[in-house]
Image (tube, rainbow, N blue to C red):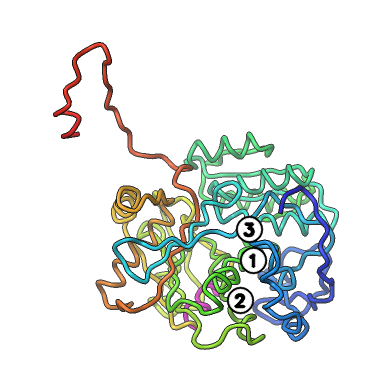
Amino acid sequence: MPGSAQATDTPSNFVTHLECSTTGERYPAGELIGLSSSGKPLLVRYDLDRVAAVGRESLADRPEGMWRYRELLPVRGEIVSLGETATQLVPLLDAPGVLVKDEGRLPTGSFKARGVAMAVTMAKAQGVRRVAMASNGNAGAALAAYASRAGMESYVFCPEDTPEINVREIALQGAKVWRVNGLIDVCGSIVAAGTQSMGWFDVSTLKEPYRIEGKKTMGIELADQLGWELPDVIFYPTGGGTGLIGMWKAFDELSEMGWIRGPLPRMVAVQSEGCAPIVKAWEEGADHAEPWQDAETIAFGIRVPAAIGDFLMLRAIRESDGFALAVPDSEISGAQERLAGSDGLLMSPEGAATVAAYQRARDQGLVGGDDRIVLFNCGSGLKYPMPPTNATLDHRAPIDWEAIARA
């Protein structure tokens, strides 16, 4: 949808309340709120009987994109939008039955646009004028863009080794950005510490209820694109886990309404061996993940040593009969280079991690050759460092065509 602010006809009472993800305590919808009184993420709940009565057939006449599913979103009033279109499903050439959902085609070049568009829309509706977050890069870029679109001030705190292009993108799109000599959890503590002094609203991962609602549109949209039949397995690059949690929430809502039937997908959390707290917790049968020490990986977006929604990710993995898998950076970079050269897909390192994880899962018999599989590429590879290329040609000298053929 074009435009910075649009009307929506979503009745506000489709949202019934907010709910603490651990205690079930209820909170009224429409109020500005971050975490529950227990310090845990809040989940938005809907009157699904009324949503179901609208009928999924009515969606067909609406434009594609995340706002198509407005009855399952908390929007009221204006929408802050940069044109969040549906993202394409691209088949892998050498892997029949495997599709890549390319979220890098969204505004600001990553799937962070979905969650941040929703969070900023709701924050604006609740009178917020200043927002802040901790970010490994892409979420901060999305916040800068959407906050500027909404006329808000934005503040972003990034680990000091965040790719330069991300930091510059954040600054160019209007946010005040700082590099911090620590990882994203340290950046998050700075945002929390500044809330009272700065008067900003913290829209970091799962620190408010609405980013998850934007991210869940990945799951609704996927079901819609596949004729309301879901794949057997979903591989998802997992850091803070908003998308994994959001998609599982979407599938639960769609199933309860009868819009989808049959088994739900097995959810696979993909991490790097250099930062794999969710994988370790899953392997140990734990309900919470221990903070990962000395986290390091080329996939900055999944370098999250400690996630506030760890228990929700682990719950989704187990309820879906899924699994968690870590892959080394060498396999991530190898998959990224291979897919770029063989399939024309320039994936982010985080997206390439799902390709590497899928191959490992096939080799280990965790998925079968007949399984219908979706891999999520969460961002454009254009936003990350690329291998150097130094070939030059002097047009004034004779051209050695054999050397060019050998290059």
The amino acid type, in three-letter code, at marker 3 is: Arg
Q: CA distance from mark 1 to mark 3?
A: 9 Å
In terms of sequence position, does the residue under pointer 1 or pointer 2 come before the other?
Answer: 1
**Can residue 38 be seen at all in this image of the molecule?**
no
- The spot of residue 132 in percent (x, y) is 69, 48
- The spot of residue 195 in percent (x, y) is 74, 51
In the rendered structure, are the residues bearing label 1 and label 2 in contact, judged by CB atoms less than 8 Å apart?
yes
Residue at which label 1 appears? 212
Among all residues in the image, which is located at the extreme top? Answer: 396
In terms of sequence position, does the residue under pointer 3 or pointer 2 come before the other?
Answer: 3
Classify mark 1: helix, strand or loop: helix
- The spot of residue 5 in percent (x, y) is 80, 51
Nearest the viewer among 341 and 320 is 341
Q: CA distance from mark 3 to mark 2?
A: 15 Å
Answer few, some or many: residues within 10 Å of disc 2's Cα (few below 14, many 20 plus, some between 14 and 19). many
Q: Which segment is the magenta one?
A: 310-319
Residue beneath the point at 52% across and 73% down? 226
Residue beneath the point at 43% across and 80% down? 285
Q: Quadrant of the N terminus?
A: bottom right
Residue at which label 2 appears? 249
Is 31 left or right of 297, judged from the image as shown? right
Residue at which label 3 appears? 114
